Amino acid sequence: MDILLEKIYEDNALGRLDDERYQAMHQKYVGEHYRLKEELAVLEALIKNYESGNDNALKFIQIVETYAAFIWFVFSKNIC
């Protein structure tokens, strides 16, 4: 986005792009920039939540494996 903004600024400064068109394009690109920033923040939050959920699932699996090993030990020794 920054490259596009620089390009239209240069084109405007060199007279290849009139002021009205520059303003319209600048507003469009700036709006798109902020929209993409917001979308990126949402996607990063989704990834963080996914990774957190994934961590919780792994912890749950470890707990289940621990209890399964304990139960296997108890039944294999005929303790109960």
Image (cartoon, rainbow, N blue to C red):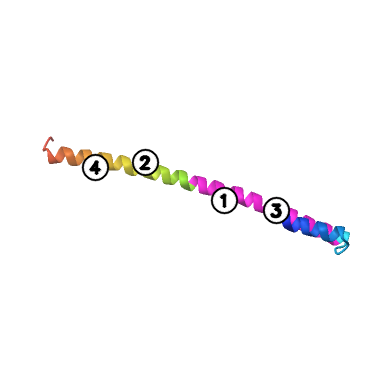
In the picture, the disc for residue 43 is 1
What residue is pinned by disc 2? Answer: 59
> Residue farthest to the left?
78
Of mark 1 and mark 3, the one earlier in the sequence is 3
The three-letter code of the residue at mark 4 reads Ala
Amino acid of disc 3: His
Tell me, yes or no, whether the highlighted magenta stretch contains residue 57: no
Q: Secondary structure at mark 3?
A: helix
**Which quadrant holds the C terminus?**
top left
Mark 2 neighbour density, 10 Å: few (under 14) some (14–19) many (20 or more): few
Image location of residue 11, percent across then percent down: 83, 61
Q: Is residue 17 left or right of residue 36?
A: right
Q: CA distance from mark 1 to mark 3?
A: 15 Å
Q: How many marks?
A: 4
Q: Earlier in the sequence, mark 2 or mark 1?
A: 1
- Where is mark 4, residue-wise? 68
Residue for point 65% across, 53% down: 36
Q: For residue 33, which numbered disc appears in the image?
A: 3
Callout 1 touching callout 4 (CB < 8 Å): no
Specify which label sits upstream in the sequence, 1 or 4: 1
> Mark 4 touching mark 2, by CB under 8 A?
no
Residue 14 to residue 41: above or below = below
The boundaries of the magenta stretch are 21-49
Q: Is residue 7 left or right of residue 51?
A: right
State yes or no: discs 3 and 4 in contact (Cβ < 8 Å).
Answer: no
Residue 67 appears left or right of 26: left
Q: CA distance from mark 3 to mark 4?
A: 52 Å
